[in-house]
Image (cartoon, rainbow, N blue to C red):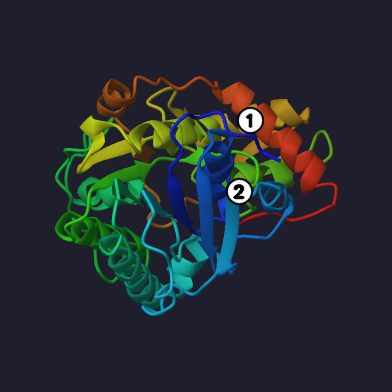
Amino acid sequence: MIEPTAAAPCRVLITGGAGFIGGHLARRLLDDGHRVDLVDNLSRGVDDELLSQLRRSDRFAVRVADLRDRRSLDDLGSDYTHIFHFAALLGVQNVIDRPYDVLTENVAMVETMLAVARRQRSLRRFVFPSTSEVYAGTQHHFELPIPSPETTPLAVSPLDQPRTSYMLSKIYGEALVHHAGVPFTIIRPHNVYGPRMGLSHVVPQLLQRIVGQPDGGELVVYSIEHSRTMCFIDDAVDYLVRLMDADAALNETFNVGVQSPEVTIGELARVLCDTVGRQLTIVAGDTAPGSPPRRCPDMRHTIAVTGHEPAVSLAEGIRRTYLWYDENVFSGRQLSAV
């Protein structure tokens, strides 16, 4: 049983809650004493050990539903205080292979959840996770300030590029949220990583390939000179929990990530090799089409409102992530949320 620690519990609904960030957020909110309901169609998220642990609490429930159907939650209650809408069609392969579906399905899901939000009697916040990809069009056409503040004017990258579909669905989602007449906070996550994030992200992908290589081998790294700042999941969740009720976060937009250190993908690969304990030669591969050469959020606004600064270093976050994958995935025990 997960025991409450907070004095004034909320009732929270998390869509896409069986996924990476949603699952970690659910655990934190239960630890804080809140009631948490998850909605997921389980097409990407996995009903795994984490959800089994959460089910031990009588303040937790899971509902399987397809949010593309506007009527899928018609019988849902109207007493939620907070809604986090993480459900989305995402992932590089989906964006490349199914850009039309990414556009239409993501918009449909936002519309479904805003309809749910508008009938809540005491909703304090609708939290909409957008994406750092919203800055990609500005970076493509103009000079994007780095670190990038939330006030950066947004431009759209070429519409015929499949990668534009995900970014555009999120920009449209932000606009819907602004005009829906519900209290909201928009977040733009930047390279959040950690245990239970599947294998379709750069950190677990590289870890899996490193583990499979003997000492003295080569590790081909794509987009090796592109740079990122990496945010460990615990810090991201801390920001979300602090923003969900902050008065200064009402109807505002926030980057969620870390501002430093900014590392190249090649440097990240070296940290991963050192963590695993493999002596590998890192070799430059191709540059991924449409991948931004730099991505770094300006975190001053978020830190000022939340009072939180990232507490987990890159080395420590990578260590925790590797230990989890070594035990839960690379050992063959399970493949968790993707």
Q: Nearer the viewer, residue 91 or 308?
A: 308
Quadrant assignment for the C terminus: bottom right
Q: Which picture quadrant has residue 321?
A: top right
Query: Residue shown at 39%/54% (left/top)?
Result: 80
Residue 84: x and y in percent read 40, 51
Q: Is residue 241 above or below residue 120?
A: above
Is residue 257 something that shows in the picture? no
Tell me the element at label 1: helix
Compare residues 44 and 54 and report the one nearer the observer. 54
- Dot 1 corresponds to which residue? 318
Q: Is residue 223 left or right of residue 335?
A: left
Find the distance from the CA under tag 1 to the CA under tag 2.
Answer: 13 Å
Q: Residues within 10 Å of mark 2 (few under 14, many from 20)?
A: many
Indicate the secondary structure of the residue bearing disc 2: loop
- What residue lies at 43% left-to-right and 74% top-to-bottom? 75
- Left or right: 335 as drawn, with respect to 189: right
Residue lying at 78% horizontally and 27% vertically, measured from the top left: 277
Q: Amino acid at mark 2?
A: Met
Residue 148 seen in the figure:
yes
C-beta proximity under 8 Å, tags 1 and 2: no
User: Which numbered dot is residue 197?
Assistant: 2
